């Protein structure tokens, strides 16, 4: 199972792909992903059995494109998202947003 970058079409093993996730945004239920190959940054939603790509729209995120990842599971925590596939798992922490300093 290889997962593609939608920008450069490089394909990654799950470990490489999910290790590149950062900053789980719980309100929008999105993780940030930065392609290790081309540096493209994307937001995606981890769903059971698939990844959802799309666009923010009116404070929500509409999924327009899905990439199937059979066996993919997710568990939302308070300040993190746990992703698991087969026997591997990855933890994507929520970056604490500091109030702006004036
Ligand atoms: Zn890429």
Image (cartoon, rainbow, N blue to C red):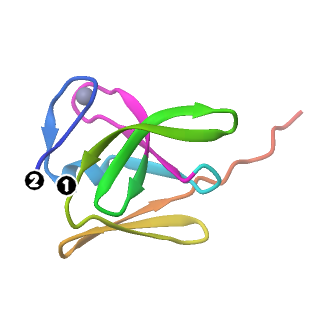
| Location of residue 36 in the rendering, given as x and y in whole percent from the top left corner | 25, 36
Q: Which of 50 and 97 is in front in this view?
A: 50
| Location of residue 83 in the rendering, given as x and y in whole percent from the top left corner | 36, 65
Q: Neighbour class for label 1 at 10 Å: few (<14), some, many (≥20)? A: many
SS for tag 2?
Answer: loop
**Which residues make up the magenta segment?**
29-44
Quadrant of the image occupied by residue 96: bottom right
Quadrant of the image occupied by residue 8: top left
For label 1, the residue is: 14
| Location of residue 76 in the rendering, given as x and y in whole percent from the top left corner | 51, 69
Distance of mark 2 from mark 1, alpha carbons?
Answer: 7 Å
> Can residue 42 be found in the magenta stretch?
yes
How many numbered discs, if any? Answer: 2
Q: Residue at x 52, y 38 (%)?
A: 62
| Location of residue 38 in the rendering, given as x and y in whole percent from the top left corner | 26, 25
Which numbered disc, 2 or 1, marks the residue that appears first in the sequence?
Answer: 2
- Check contact, mark 2 vs mark 1: CB within 8 A: yes
> Can residue 36 be found in the magenta stretch?
yes
For discs 2 and 1, the disc positioned in front in the rendered view: 2
For label 2, the residue is: 1
Q: Is residue 93 left or right of residue 89?
A: right
Q: In this view, does 65 lie to the left or right of 3?
A: right
Q: Neighbour class for label 2 at 10 Å: few (<14), some, many (≥20)? A: few
Task: Name the quadrant of the C terminus.
Answer: top right
In terms of image quarters, where does ligand 1 lie? top left
Q: Nearer the viewer, residue 20 or 73?
A: 73
Q: Which of 88 and 58 is in front in this view?
A: 58
């Amino acid at each position: 199972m290889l997962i593609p970058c939608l920008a450069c079409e490089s394909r990654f093993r799950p470990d490489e792909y999910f290790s590149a996730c950062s900053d789980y945004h719980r309100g929008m239920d999105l993780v940030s992903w930065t392609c290790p190959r081309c540096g493209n940054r994307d937001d995606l939603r981890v769903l059971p059995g698939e990844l959802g790509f799309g666009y923010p729209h009116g404070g929500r995120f509409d999924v327009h494109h899905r990439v199937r990842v059979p066996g993919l599971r997710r568990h939302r925590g308070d300040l993190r998202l746990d992703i698991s596939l087969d026997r591997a798992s990855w933890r994507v922490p929520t970056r604490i947003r500091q109030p702006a300093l004036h």
